[in-house]
Amino acid sequence: MRVLHVNKFLYRRGGAEGYLLDLAGLQRAAGDEVAYFGMTHPQNESPLPYAEHFPSYVELDPPPRGLRPRAAAAGRMIWSPQSRRGLAAVLADFRPDVVHLHNVYHQLSPSVLAAARAAGVPCVLTLHDYKLACPSYQLLDRGAVCDACVTGGPLMAVRRGCKGGLGASALLAIESWLHRTLRAYDGVAAFVSPSRFLAGVMRRAGVFPDRMHVLPHFADVAALPVKVAPGGGVVYAGRLAPEKGVDTLIDAVAALPAGVPVDVAGDGPARAALEERASRRAPGRIRFHGRLDKPRLHELVRSAAVVAVPSRWHENQPMAVLEAFGCGVPVVGTDLGGLPELITPGVDGEIVPADDPAALGAALARLVAAPGRAYELGRAARAKVERDFTPGAHLAGLRELYALAGAPR
């Protein structure tokens, strides 16, 4: 089978990109031919044979300065002729059996679906966030959980000004309203949701409920070494952004015994603010490592007694949890989104309320203080991944969805 993966970023920027690249590797190992289409970006993986057809790089967070650049970026968010032309050229040369879309919003736009439809290639889209139900992606209103647009429609974002002001909120709301009104995503034959929670949100919002399919992500742990001895501290691994709740973890450090190492791996727009907060709230107790490659990240995770996922937004199905489980380390996560679907309290981790440093700190302290128990929870976590999140089952499920979309078996 020939599979074309389409995503705006083509480097390990976050969970969506990590899943995409790992899935492509899995498909190649199974004998499929795989190619990519995305936006031009200095950090994209190399080589990318079709890079000459990619639309130009544009930074939208923060948005470009100046009236003309902002207007051009806004137009591109709604419909990108450059993306459509580029994908049409790739489709003509690569001739895929299926186009597998991921995060195409904003930088690529649903114009890519028009190219696929014109070429007669079926499309499947994996949902990595809530964009098709929530204009600001995250079901958040200035940091607080919100589902107003799920039931009230995307124009609720204008009324609430939830994206940091009326202008930005209006642009995102109008973009979503236009795409919904014009049924811009109607060309997607099957939507893939990694969690039951996200699928439920989409159904409540009326986002193609008859085409929504739940298929959990996978974790290839066969060659991944597992933690071999009890002990260690706390690790956070992920993007450093406000919705991830790393500030809550920093505030929770006060509940941990002195000398317990707390390591933060990852990068993002909140890094400088988080480092400054750590220097004030927990001086000398938290180490920031930046973005690590997979071997070094897994080594860091295995050194921990527990991994913290302190998110204050409705996580979908974060790979950070599955990778921690694969390393044989339990997870303390919050009670939002798909996290409770992954973590079974007292079996492979703990669930705590979001934005509650005291509860998070107490749960982490209990596991750090009982390394033998944490180790046993980690072994159960590894067994869960080996049983429920295998690459083979994921690939088989995806092939069924490709066939349902119209791709040949």
Image (cartoon, rainbow, N blue to C red):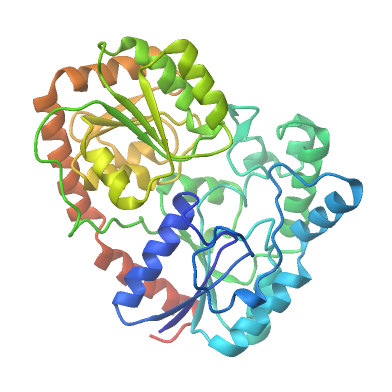
In the picture as drawn, the residue positioned furthest to the front comes out as: 284
Q: How many labels does the image show?
A: 0
Quadrant of the drawing holding the N terminus? bottom left
Q: Is residue 120 left or right of residue 315?
A: right
Q: Is residue 33 left or right of residue 294?
A: right
Residue 216: image location, x then y, percent: 35, 55
Q: Position of residue 191 (x, y in %)?
A: 51, 63
Q: In which quarter of the image is residue 388?
A: bottom left
- Residue 120 % position (x, y): 61, 86
* Nearer to the camera, 291 or 220: 291
Q: Position of residue 379 (x, y in %)?
A: 13, 40
Q: Which residue is drawn at the image coordinates 25% and 35% (left, top)?
A: 344
Q: Which residue is drawn at 41% across and 49% down?
A: 195
* Front position in the image: 51 or 307: 51
Figure check: 315 above or below 365: below
Residue 82 falls in image quadrant = bottom right
389 or 370: nearer the eye? 370
Q: Vertically, is 354 above or below 399?
A: above
Residue toward you, 302 or 275: 275
